[in-house]
Image: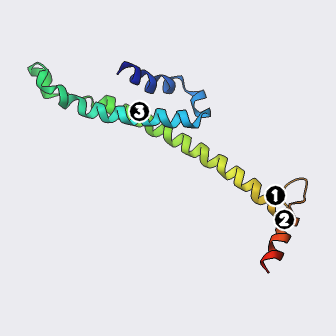
């Protein structure tokens, strides 16, 4: 369990470089969401074993909320980053086909495509 906790929290705490690896960032976001779920149910699992004053308020809700917030922020940032990259790539491809790209030549592709459709 400690290794899973470290795997989920350490890269997020390190910040910056994590967003450069989209697959790792999404795995960490998923791990954080899973740990948030586990934290919500953890109090109920061990409530019967706790002494009297603690069994009434056995909750890890604050921890769960922090984990869920971190998962949402990390996952959301990664989705927005990927959306921007895809938009740039598609925009460059469309500009090339229309001939708007520097270096020209793309307009011929568009004219040829229109001619083949007619």
Asked where in the image residue 79 lies, by quadrant, the reply is top right
Residue carrying label 2 = 109
Taking the image as shown, residue 116 lies to the left or right of residue 89, namely: right
Which residue: 15% across, 26% down?
47
**Toward the viewer: 4 or 70?**
4
Mark 3 surroundings: few (<14), some (14-19) or many (≥20) residues within 10 A: many
Q: Which comes before the other along the chain, label 3 or label 2? A: 3
Quadrant (top left/top right/bottom left/bottom right) for the C terminus:
bottom right
Residue carrying label 3 = 32
Which residue: 60% across, 49% down?
83
Mark 1 surroundings: few (<14), some (14-19) or many (≥20) residues within 10 A: many
Q: Position of residue 100 (x, y in %)?
A: 84, 59
Taking the image as shown, residue 59 lies to the left or right of residue 48, namely: right
Q: Which comes before the other along the chain, label 1 or label 2? A: 1
Question: Rounded to the nearest whole Å, what is the CA distance between mark 1 and mark 2?
Answer: 9 Å
What secondary structure is marked by label 2?
Answer: helix
- In the picture, the disc for residue 96 is 1
Question: Rounded to the nearest whole Å, what is the CA distance between mark 3 and mark 2?
Answer: 47 Å
Which residue: 82% across, 67% down?
110
What secondary structure is marked by label 1?
Answer: helix
- In the picture, the disc for residue 85 is none
Quadrant (top left/top right/bottom left/bottom right) for the N terminus:
top left
Q: Which comes before the other along the chain, label 3 or label 1? A: 3
Mark 2 surroundings: few (<14), some (14-19) or many (≥20) residues within 10 A: some
Q: Position of residue 15 (x, y in %)?
A: 55, 26
What secondary structure is marked by label 3?
Answer: helix
Question: Rounded to the nearest whole Å, what is the CA distance between mark 3 and mark 1?
Answer: 41 Å
Q: Position of residue 80 (x, y in %)?
A: 57, 45
Q: Are marks 1 and 2 in contact (CB under 8 Å)?
A: yes
Which residue: 88% across, 66% down?
108
Q: Are marks 3 and 1 in contact (CB under 8 Å)?
A: no
Q: Are marks 3 and 2 in contact (CB under 8 Å)?
A: no
């Amino acid at each position: 369990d400690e290794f899973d906790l470290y795997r989920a929290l350490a890269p997020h705490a390190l910040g910056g470089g994590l967003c450069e690896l989209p697959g790792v960032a999404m795995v960490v976001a998923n791990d954080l969401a899973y740990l948030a779920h586990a934290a919500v149910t953890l109090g109920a699992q061990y409530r019967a074993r706790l002494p009297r004053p603690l069994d009434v308020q056995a909750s890890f809700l604050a921890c769960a909320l922090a984990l869920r917030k971190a998962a949402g922020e990390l996952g959301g940032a990664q989705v927005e980053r990927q959306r921007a990259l895809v938009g740039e790539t598609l925009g460059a491809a469309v500009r090339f086909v229309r001939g708007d790209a520097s270096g020209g030549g793309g307009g011929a592709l568009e004219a040829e495509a229109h001619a083949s459709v007619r």
